[in-house]
Amino acid sequence: MRRLFPRQLANLVVEHALRHRLFATQLLGEAGLLDITDHTGLHEARAAIRDAASVTTGSRWQISDVEAAGHQLAAEIEILCARPATTAMLDLVEEAILVWDDLSGHLRDAYRITRTEPEEITEPLFNARHDLCERLDLDAEEIGHRLTRLIERCHHDTIDIDTYTDLLGEHARTITRPNHW
């Protein structure tokens, strides 16, 4: 039986962390080395949101560009949410949801040629938002207010209100979907 020495294990972990930012962030978080005041994750997520928002602004884009931007957006949000929770993170996740809501309309229109269902991106974004609401210990009224504001700005049925009933409590019945059409 071959044995791995501590130095070899450390080298393997470092090599993996250098190739995978999510793993690196999770590792630093577990080690207690992530500072809530470090805004590196916010800057990277903001750049991914900006990139995703601009994917369809040129004249030469394809559905595959929208799909790739959505997957990159979800990956960046997952990396961001591996850090200590802040309200600024929640704001960025909500911004990412709005950008994805706009982009998902293109996938819905081109459903015959897409390889990605809009929900493949929507679900991790909303799971991240839900998790942040819990980690930030927001009260039901604040969650409801933020959710209502988000619903009003989404135009492609991106939001499943039912996923928030556990956080909203009695406020759940006050949240309704506006008619955009």
Image (cartoon, rainbow, N blue to C red):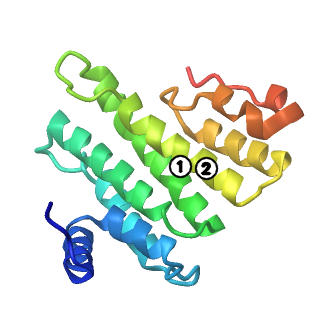
Residue linked to disc 2: 131
Residue at position x 29%, y 45% in the image: 71
The quadrant of the rendering that contains the N terminus is bottom left
Residue density around tag 2, few if under 14, some if 14–19, many if 20 or more, within 10 Å: some
Which disc, if any, is residue 46?
Answer: none
Looking at the picture, tell me which residue is in the foreground, 174 or 33.
33
Which disc, if any, is residue 128?
Answer: 1
Residue density around tag 1, few if under 14, some if 14–19, many if 20 or more, within 10 Å: many
Q: Amino acid at mark 2?
A: Asp
For this view, does 164 lie left or right of residue 120?
A: right
Q: CA distance from mark 2 to mark 1?
A: 5 Å
Looking at the picture, tell me which residue is in the foreground, 43 or 20.
20
Q: Residue 46's image quarter?
A: bottom left
For this view, does 72 lie left or right of residue 88?
A: left
Up the image or down, 139 lies above or below 30; here it is: above
For this view, does 125 lie left or right of residue 152?
A: left
Residue at position x 19%, y 34% in the image: 63
Name, please, the residue furthest toward the front: 1
The quadrant of the rendering that contains the C terminus is top right
Up the image or down, 139 lies above or below 111; here it is: below
Give the image location of residue 134, x and y in percent: 70, 52
What is the tally of numbered marks visible in this picture? 2
Give the image location of residue 161, x and y in percent: 66, 29
In what element is the residue under mark 2?
A: helix
Give the image location of residue 20, x and y in percent: 25, 64
Labelled pair 2, 1 in contact (Cβ < 8 Å) = yes
Q: Residue 109's image quarter?
A: top left
Looking at the picture, tell me which residue is in the foreground, 79 or 54.
79
Residue at position x 21%, y 25% in the image: 114
Q: Residue 68's image quarter?
A: top left
Q: Amino acid at mark 1?
A: Ala
Give the image location of residue 179, x and y in percent: 63, 22
